[in-house]
Image (spheres, rainbow, N blue to C red):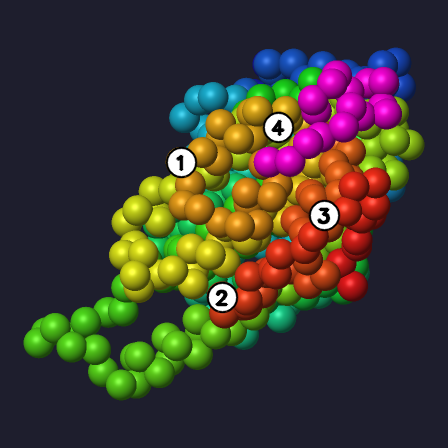
Amino acid sequence: MSDIRHSLLRRDALSAAKEVLYHLDIYFSSQLQSAPLPIVDKGPVELLEEFVFQRLNSLQELQLLEIMCSYFQEQSKDSVRQIIFSSLFSPQGNKADDSRMSLLGKLVSMAVAVCRIPVLECAASWLQRTPVVYCVRLARALVDDYCCLVPGSVQTLKQIFSASPRFCCQFITSVTALYDLSSDDLIPPLDLLEMIVNWIFEDPRLILITFLNTPIAANLPIGFLELTPLTGLIRWCVKAPLAYKRKKQPPLANGHVTAKVTKDSGGVDRDSHLLYSKLHLSALQVLMMLQVHLTEKNLYGRLGLILFDHMVPLVEEINRLADELNPLNASQEIELSLDRLAQALQVAMASGALLCTRDDLRTLCSRLPHNNLLQLVISGPVPQSPHAALPPGFYPHIHTPPLGYGAVPAHPAAHPALPTHPGHTFISGMTFPFRPIR
């Protein structure tokens, strides 16, 4: 590599960067002939950091991005594309990572604009194997480019749904990790929310693509994106009523809000409310698909796609928001939030996506405000599971008479004014099967 470096030093910055890509292509193509998973040596990484990430002005960077897009489009071997993409953009934990992430965001943004599917597929793999702290940075770059800076540009981002569903799945997972509704700044933009809801509503299987196409061990690595965005989508739907209630109107100098601001904000809130209701329905439908898929992969009762440990901070946040908001002014929002939580918990447990004991669930939800639907989910007898893989006391199955009948209504919680479910007389020996959402 030292000879190559001396040769590159005699070139201008753009030519040197192009030459690095050329040498990497030759180097890894040769490596892949002798080993299916070649190790990226220190030498190629150092060349990249010296000649690609630190020496280009804005015009040269744009030209390099065009060259990269063309290279990944024309390289016919996916294995070569993937390893070169990885060597270019895998974080190294040094000062070059900022430049690396900046260039990656611009490359993927350009690939979206000109529909370079090979780049999007490489980016999907990168998102799957890269720590989540970097994944959310890429997600934010794309959201800024297509949902914030230029009005209407989200239409371009929408088109990748059919071009690269795998990238869309990983993008949704990244976005739900980024926008956790913990503050007003971390509520997803309306254009982004609408796009994701429409993607999932059109094909709910979209959010299972990574899970269905990835060899999976029972123990997933910590600090990386989850296999599905289900946990993040549940977080969105459950927290949304409270988060939007918390969101304050921008006041004028005299402390009053103009009628126009109030009207516009009310319209946005109504639009978002309908979108979250639609998203909640889709998430429940996907959860009900999971039992079959988990069984097919021999992971039923062994792999929780929705981790109980991730439910703990969600419940704590709901409790905190409910305390912050005046219950007298936010009773409908609190009720809706808890209804959605109860439905998500029951369907997740019934499908095997969430593995926990009833005692765990009762302890988790003990400090939440009272909610009839949630009480049905965390109480009532639970028969021993017929699945040998699950120890006694674990969900699923939860098809018990008082629980299966009342805990998931025929329609998901979609309106804060929905009446509570009437009481039903329990007749011993009569079963009430779990009913799918219609």
Q: Main secondary structure of the magenta part?
A: loop
Residue 161: quarter of image: bottom right
* Residue 367's disc number: 1
- Which residue reaches farthest bottom? 259
At horizontal 72% and vertical 14% (from top left) the residue drawn is 39
- As measured in the structure, the alpha-carbon distance from the residue carrying label 4 to the one carrying label 3 is 21 Å
> Mark 4–mark 1 contact, CB under 8 Å?
no
| Secondary element at image label 4 | helix
Q: Earlier in the sequence, mark 3 or mark 2?
A: 2
- As measured in the structure, the alpha-carbon distance from the residue carrying label 3 to the one carrying label 2 is 27 Å
Circle 3 packing at 10 Å, graded few (<14), some (14-19), many (20+), is few
Circle 4 packing at 10 Å, graded few (<14), some (14-19), many (20+), is some
Percent coordinates x, y for residue 68 in the rendering = 66, 45
- The C terminus sits in image quarter: bottom right
Q: Earlier in the sequence, mark 4 or mark 3?
A: 4
> Mark 3–mark 2 contact, CB under 8 Å?
no
Percent coordinates x, y for residue 53 in the rendering = 50, 35
Q: Nearer the viewer, residue 185 or 377?
A: 377
Q: Which residues are magenta?
A: 379-394
Point out the frontmost of discs 4 and 2. 4
| Mark 2 lies on residue | 416
Q: Earlier in the sequence, mark 4 or mark 1?
A: 4
- As measured in the structure, the alpha-carbon distance from the residue carrying label 3 to the one carrying label 1 is 28 Å
Q: Earlier in the sequence, mark 3 or mark 1?
A: 1
**Amino acid at dot 4:** Arg
**Amino acid at dot 1:** Arg
- As measured in the structure, the alpha-carbon distance from the residue carrying label 4 to the one carrying label 1 is 15 Å
| Mark 3 lies on residue | 426
Residue 173 left/right relative to 351: left
Point out the frontmost of discs 3 and 1. 3
| Mark 4 lies on residue | 358
